[in-house]
Amino acid sequence: MIKTNSIVFKFSLQVTLILVILITVLVMSNVYSLEVVRNNSLAHSQGTLAIHKSNVQHAFNSYERDLIDVFENNIDLASSLIDLDSNTSYFRQVQLRNALQLKMSRNESSDGMFIKIGENDIVLEQYNSRIYSENKLILSDSIRSASFMTEDYDSNEWTSLNIKGEYYLVKIISFSGIRFGTIVKADTLLALIHKSDTDSNQYAISNEQGVVIAASEQQKSDVGIALDELVSMKSDQYFIVSEAVDQVGKLTNMVEKKNVFWKLKSIQWMIISLAVISCVVVPVVLRNLARDIVKPVLELVKASKEIEKGQLEFRDPTRNYSIEFMKLFQSFRSMIREIKELKISSYEEQLERNRLELKYLQMQIRPHFYLNAISTITSLTYQHKNKEIRKMISHLSDHLRYMFNGVLTEIQIGEEIKHVENYIAMQDIRFPNQVFFMTEINEMARKEYIPQYMIQTFVENIFKHAIVYGEMMSIFIRVDMETHEDAASFVKITIEDNGCGFPQEVLLGQSEQQNQEMQHKVGIANIRKTLQLLYKRDDLLQLSNIENSGAKVELWIPCTEERRRGESHALFNNR
């Protein structure tokens, strides 16, 4: 009986469906892909042809600009040759030849330029290196005897000329019997196309009469025939696309069909071969599936159930499976080991938390503060300062309410500052006109969370160790937001006073071990340990002395999205 819910059955069914789909796609693709490739090839040819057309048009524009430039700058000089004597005429001709030579020296120049002056039959001409010497003589004779150079010649059009079997394009500007002309060999335009072509396609250029005047090397024999005849002859072997070029005729791109289809046919035969091989391989794969995949998966499932029951021991697999599964077994074994270590670590962290709570309780219980508060109230009764007594009792009540609010609690910075202000108000009653207190709180930082008593502990130490009776005590607290180089956001808390500053031994030894002897004075070790437990960092507390002033405490509290949503740190009780 076949188990339809087994992984072997599901895998077999899926593979069979995939094979059927692949064969169907292959049959359909054989009908459709040829047409798609043909259309893509034609589209690519049209795009390539548009680029070459633009290059040819740009070249013609450059040739025309050169011709116009020579005409405008030298027409007066050429006109003066008609009535000059031979000596003066010679030097003027040299100037004109130099002007033509200057244009021919450009890389983007036409193949030749000439000036023919009226009835004197003066012909000045200059050719570039693309024209061979024998062709220069032929062109020179043709220019002297050319019948197309008449007064009514259209200077806005290029004319195609067949000179001794070679095709040239000529443009002439006529004025008062003086003709300025530029000549481009048709093969030069074709060379310009091949220079920028990367597909090794065949090209042909035809004039406005439809005659092929230039063609690629393989089609060289077709020069001189009609373009329509060429298309009819080559359409079975080539994809042919033509584009009209202004004032010239047409530019034709010919892509050989066999170069387009041979890769496609190779890929199709490859896919068919793979499909046949797959039909043979699938049964073998299915047979090995149960041995290489199903069995190790079942072993992992069994081990997972044992872990759910609390059994944290994992036995080695019964046999050597594939590398991937052996890595998975190793990862599973590492996971179990980490679970055991995390349990132990959790117990240790709980013990450390209890120790920290005791230390916090010790920090909260300040017998000297309460004795001083009671002494202050007693002194005020003798002085009949009832108003100050009521203020002192009110502030003390708020202070006690805050102190007994909970142990190891995170609160907003605004609440901690409010408690500090209440504490300083009590001290102001005790030391009238001796305390100057100022805060600068960033509004964004006011709602961030910090451990309770974090600021109050340092303020309390100021009154315990820094204040001197009869002298003014200044306390400044700044809370701001900072972003460090690693893009982490922090709340920076700075506490400054104008007392005598920290002892040198505190500044030199800011580790927990070196500060054990100072715990009864400032509680620095407790604060540092709290920060390390909460944020796993040892660089969040910095102590220093301000030159000619007093002590400076800097705290950095990391900002997290959990705190902003009001979620407690794992070490804290629920608020």
Image: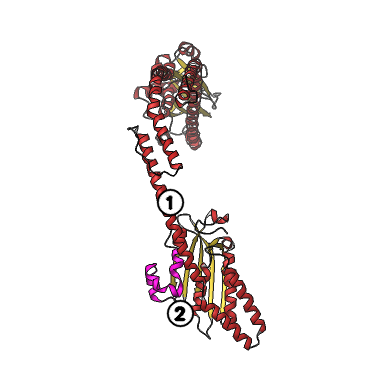
Marks 1 and 2 close (CB-CB < 8 Å): no
Residue at image coords 48%, 63%:
556
Q: From the viewer's perspective, is the residue at label 1 or at label 2 nearer?
A: 1
- The label shown at residue 509 is none
Q: How many marks?
A: 2
Disc 1 from disc 2: Cα separation: 47 Å
Image: magenta residue range: 500-529
Q: Residues within 10 Å of mark 2 (few under 14, many from 20)?
A: some
Identify which residue is drawn at 58% across, 61% down: 447
Residue at label 2?
500
Quadrant of the image containing the C terminus: bottom right
Dot 1: few (<14), some (14–19), or many (≥20) neighbours within 10 Å? few
Percent x, y for residue 348? 42, 57
Q: Amino acid at mark 2?
A: Cys
Is residue 514 shown in magenta?
A: yes
Instruction: Verify whether residue 33 appears in magenta.
Output: no
Position of residue 76 measured from the top left corner of the image (x, y, whole percent): 50, 36
**Which of the 4 image quadrants contains residue 298?**
top left
Q: Is residue 109 above or below residue 552?
A: above
| Image height of 60 relative to 161, above or below | below
Disc 1 designates what residue? Answer: 343
